[in-house]
Amino acid sequence: MKRVDFDYFERHFPHRPSDAHKGTMGTLVSLTGSFGFAGAAILSAKAALRSGVGLHYQVLPESIYPLFGTAVQESVCVPVKGDQGRLSPMDIGSIHPLLDKATAVLIGCGMGCSETTAAVEKTVLDTVTCPVIMDADGINALARHIHDLDGFQSDIVLTPHVKEFSRLSGISVEEIISDPAKHAEEYSLSHRDVILVLKGHRTYIAQNGEVVENIAGNSGMAKGGSGDVLAGIIASLTAQGAEPYHAAVMGVHIHALAGDLAAAKLSQTAMLPSDIIEALPEIYMKIEDTIG
């Protein structure tokens, strides 16, 4: 089984030319957050921006727009009416031109889990050709509609923790925990359009039977919001042009290294997911020094 070192970044990290501008460094469209869960949208957006994407558009229910807009000044906010504080399929119909510009789309992260969420996902999948990263509520809603992934036009990155993966796969939590690498490999072989990031004490990234194990990270990262940070990192790297599988591998490693740095400075007990974001610049400086 493969593991990641900094040589991996030399081969796969998105190139940032000296004449780059915001339009050449990717356009990420995020459909995240709902009433009561603005924090998930904020964390994923901040992580994406810290990870270098050129343009970030945040589609969100207007009920959380003031909170998000105050917390994240660099995103372009697209407030929509929503339905009971959540995005609705009718909202997606109004942002087709924006989705056409996207080089990656992030769905989930506090979006809420309901049939409405599933309908939003279906509408997006039927609309876009760029890679789609699905996290948290996006995965939970998808579990009842897994057939919607069949024949999708581009790559899908799923980032479930073990319980979410159990809902997706129908395999018990206990069985998954007994051999997560095996189940990640088997799922990736039976769903060849999917890149799986199976999160846990050891995180496994799998596509078409190829599995990479991440051993960095620490238990201080076991806090609500850490997954939103990871989703933002992976989505950002994908939007910048990294192959989605490589973006997932690099994103997991970057997230874990930043978590270790936050724990070293603040302790595993006291560190927060927002501290992982604050640690990202130091990790990216090491990557840039490595790749030249």
Image: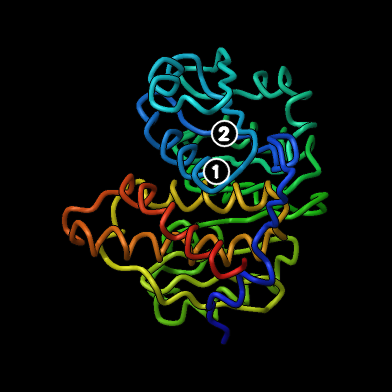
The numbered mark at residue 138 is 1
- Camera-side residue: 67 or 201? 67
24 versus 131 height, above or below: above
110 versus 59 height, above or below: below
- Camera-side residue: 148 or 44? 44
**Quadrant holding the C terminus:** bottom right
Q: Which residue is tagged 2?
A: 117
**Quadrant holding the N terminus:** bottom right
- Name the residue at 47% across, 47% down: 136
- Name the residue at 69% across, 71% down: 11
Res. 99 image quadrant: top right
Answer whether labels 1 and 2 touch (C-beta < 8 Å). yes
Considering every residue shown, the one lying at the far bottom of the view is 1
Three-letter code, disc 2: Thr
Three-letter code, disc 1: Gly
Residue 130 placement (x, y as % from top left) = 77, 45
78 versus 75 height, above or below: above
